[in-house]
Amino acid sequence: MSSDKKLPYDPIVRYERRLENVICEPITEFDGKLAATVEKMFDTMYAYHGVGLAAPQLGNFVCLNVIDFPQHDFRRVLINPEILEEKGETVEREGCLSIPGKNVQAPVRRNKTITYTYQDVNGTRHEETIDGWKARCVQHEVDHLKGIFFINRVSPLWKDLVLNRYQNFCKGMKEVDN
Ligand SMILES: [Zn+2]
């Protein structure tokens, strides 16, 4: 670790088996508290150098994601997102802030193009069709709201490999702490 200083942000909840299939609650109140939560999520995501973050990754089990993928000019606050249509297939390597470690990415098969709907921070509903990395990112994020991690979408061999490397990383962190 480069530094011991504590981030002024919520720590990201790491993957555990018991978090699989945990379904998030829809958001119904579009108020200042929600706006503050969204800001905090962006701050946390940037602090961890991620391009997407789901509320359950901060232990808040509600249907909310933030995305900022500058290479693809794609910044979104997704509230109660829902995928309506999916087309095509593509395989690319993915990782996740909840599964840190060395070489913990794995090839994940996803739909190439999706049409999805979401509400923004004011509660306004939007619908759009996206493809490529944008579509991959949204699918990864929407999965988080259903307790699905990318390792739940790879072969058993890849899952074992990623989990081994992840567990080694967590063990290493503990030794550093002690
Ligand atoms: Zn993730």
Image (tube, grey):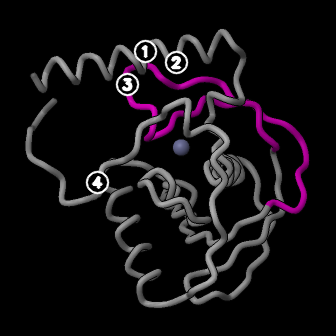
Mark 1 lies on residue: 165
Q: Which mark is residue 162?
A: 2
Instruction: Tell me which numbered mark, 3 or 4, is placed earlier along the sequence.
Output: 4
Find residue 159 and report its image quarter.
Answer: top right
Q: What is the spatial separation of the Cα atoms under label 2 and label 4, in whole angstroms?
A: 23 Å
Residue 177, disc: none
Image quadrant where one finds the N terminus: top left
* Residue tagged 3: 101
What kind of residue is marked 2? Val
Percent across and percent down for residue 34 are 47, 80
Q: Position of residue 71 (x, y in %)?
A: 51, 54
First of labels 1, 4 by sequence position: 4
Q: CA distance from mark 3 to mark 4?
A: 16 Å
Q: Nearer the viewer, residue 41 or 20?
A: 20
84 magenta-colored: yes
**Amino acid at pointer 3:** Gly
Q: Amino acid at mark 4?
A: Ala
Instruction: Read off the magenta span.
Output: 83-111
Residue assigned mark 4 = 47
Q: CA distance from mark 3 to mark 1?
A: 6 Å
Local secondary structure at mark 4: helix
Spatial separation of the CA atoms under disc 2 and disc 1: 5 Å
Q: Amino acid at mark 1?
A: Arg
Work out whether 158 lies above or below 88. above
